[in-house]
Amino acid sequence: MPTGGSATFQGPIGIKNIVGRVTGGEVSMIDGALRSEIPAATLFLLNPHGIVMGAHARLDVGGSFYMSTAHDLRFEDGVVFQARYESGSVLSTAAPRAFGFLDGPVEDIHIQGSHLTVPRGKTLGIIGGDMAIEAGRLRAPSGTLSLASVSQVMVRAEVSLSAAEMVVPEGMRLGDVTISDAARLETDGNGGGLVAIRSGQWTMAQSDISAENDGNVPRTGASIDIAATELPPPTRLAFVMAHRSAWIAALQDVVAM
């Protein structure tokens, strides 16, 4: 999508999920607006060959938004929608439940100055290979922001769409998540939200993560949940805030305020 361009998804008002699959073997370069005219519908964008979101990339959706370089999308009724092949794949009226990965490497996702926001209480999910978030802003006010990086798959496996169940199974090698150049990830709002990250090496530089409860609705459970197998040097960490709520991290040098 060129700078300033747009892609608009349309359909009957009762549709709950929209699945956009990019075929052709090329990386998606998105530097414009992704729009949905279907109220409250969740939008899925899949390109197993890679995704780059530019500085002009924006979301205009009424529901949650997921982007992924997974190899397929799996539904509650067992249907599997293939992302790599145009033929031999079907969609389902059942709810999507997980992204599927086949044997081999998983392509990267780059967010370069994008401001991506979903409506209050919705989910912004990014699941793929190595991730670099540079100078961007990802917002899910009072909702969920979930990142999962998988660089290599030794056996067929899947990652759940639910942040609460986002456990990377055996047979997957976790990838790198780098957040830099004044990037900001936030789920601030009344009741707060959840930021969940699963990665191998996790690096933050000149950036921050915020899940502040700025209202009077109490939150139960974690607000920031980070599980990484490799820690960054403490001097490179930026602030991680979870005001008036609990947070969990599989890291020792994160600063909580």
Image (cartoon, helix red, strand yellow):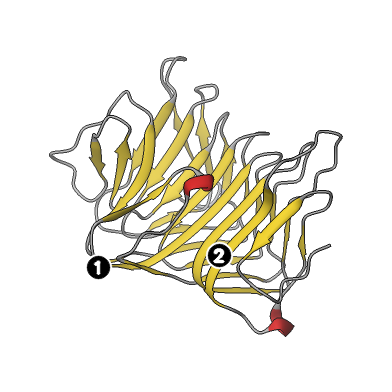
Q: Residues within 10 Å of mark 2 (few under 14, many from 20)?
A: some
- In this figure, what is the number of numbered marks? 2
Name the amino acid type tagged 1: Met
Which residue is found at the position 72% from the left and 71% from the top? Answer: 254
Q: Earlier in the sequence, mark 2 or mark 1?
A: 1
Label 2 secondary element: strand
Contact (Cβ within 8 Å) of mark 2 with mark 1: no
Relative to the observer, which residue lies in front, 16 or 101?
A: 101
Please tell me the numbered disc located at residue 129. Answer: none
Which residue is found at the position 31% from the left and 35% from the top? Answer: 75
Label 1 secondary element: loop
Could you say where residue 253 lies in the image, as x and y percent from the top left?
71, 76
Could you say where residue 98 lies in the image, as x and y percent from the top left?
37, 44
Position above or below: 83 against 95: below
Mark 1 lies on residue: 154
Please tell me the numbered disc located at residue 227. Answer: 2
Position above or below: 174 against 160: below
Could you say where residue 216 lies in the image, as x and y percent from the top left?
86, 34
Residue that sits furthest to the left in the current view: 88
Q: Mark 2 and mark 1: span between their CA atoms? A: 21 Å
Name the amino acid type tagged 2: Ala
Which residue is found at the position 63% from the left and 52% from the top? Answer: 195
> Which quarter of the figure is the C terminus placed in?
bottom right
Could you say where residue 228 lies in the image, as x and y percent from the top left?
54, 70
Relative to the observer, which residue lies in front, 117 or 170?
A: 170
Q: Residues within 10 Å of mark 1 (few under 14, many from 20)?
A: some
Which residue is found at the position 66% from the left and 84% from the top? Answer: 233
Q: Give the image quarter of residue 178.
A: bottom right
